[in-house]
Image: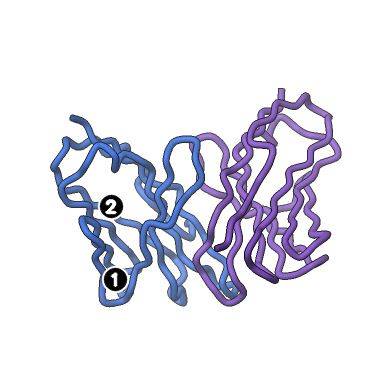
Amino acid sequence: SQTIHQWPATLVQPVGSPLSLECTVEGTSNPNLYWYRQAAGRGLQLLFYSVGIGQISSEVPQNLSASRPQDRQFILSSKKLLLSDSGFYLCAWNAAGANVLTFGAGSRLTVL
Amino acid sequence: RKEVEQDPGPFNVPEGATVAFNCTYSNSASQSFFWYRQDCRKEPKLLMSVYSSGNEDGRFTAQLNRASQYISLLIRDSKLSDSATYLCVVNSNAGNMLTFGGGTRLMVKP
């Protein structure tokens, strides 16, 4: 069966520090991968999605970036965090051509 | 206008009550519709897909009205464990990308 792992689960970072969130999927090949952000009391905002290794599409311009160095690995990064980057970051996947998304457990980021 | 709109609630209902949520979407070309459930500080999880003819899963009934561009979720005999935020999800015009509504919060009281 397929599983999705995301880490770290919680982190507190100072403004201006770098960020790296990692997501891996097991039990499938060539998944579509997504990064969403959910600010407190808000809906999910799609940040990036990837249909294959090295293929990244950005939905919202900001100081975040994403990379897909391996088929089942998706990384969200920032060189310098802003206060507004605080939120709940969710990685998700689905199979090519499928609609239903499965989410990881999320990474809760607080920028101070 | 937002692509997918939901009443944020909260809906406060007693145990055993029937409660219904609506969700409207703006893209008439949307083809796929879902309800997800999100517990506090957890990830969203698929509750049910919504089919054109309407569908039922136990106490949950989902319906689609294409003419008016809305979908609904009906929960019968509410349980305390139904307390959560319910997210309406619609595929956007850009292929199979999904757009999430802001969610409707349900609180079931004893």
The residue at the point 14 percent across, 43 percent down is: B17
Q: Which chain is blue?
A: B
Question: Percent position (x, y) of residue A55?
Answer: 79, 67
User: In screen coordinates, is B12 left or right of B99?
Assistant: left
Question: Percent position (x, y) of residue A48?
Answer: 70, 57
Q: Is residue A62 above or below residue B55?
A: above
The residue at the point 80 percent across, 62 percent down is: A70
Colouring used for the render: by chain
The residue at the point 68 percent across, 41 percent down is: A7
Front residue of this view, candidates B8 and A73:
A73
Q: Is residue B2 above or below residue A99?
A: above
User: In screen coordinates, is B26 left or right of A1?
Assistant: left
Q: Quadrant of residue A28?
A: bottom right
Q: Is residue A92 above or below residue A79?
A: below
- Which image quarter holds the C terminus of chain B? top left
Marks 1 and 2, Cα distance to the nearest angstrom?
Answer: 13 Å
* Amino acid type at image mark 1: Asn
Front residue of this view, candidates A97 and B87:
A97
User: In screen coordinates, is B48 left or right of B31?
Assistant: left
Classify mark 1: residues with Cα within 10 Å, few (<14), some (14-19) or many (20+): few
- Write down the chain letter for disc 1: B
Mark drawn on residue B65: 1
Label 1 and label 2 in one chain:
yes
Question: Percent position (x, y) of residue B50?
Answer: 34, 68
Q: Which chain is purple?
A: A
Front residue of this view, candidates A95 and B33:
A95
Question: Percent position (x, y) of residue A72?
Answer: 72, 61
- Write down the chain letter for disc 2: B
**Circle 2 residue:** B21
Mark drawn on residue A27: none
* Amino acid type at image mark 2: Phe
Number of marks? 2
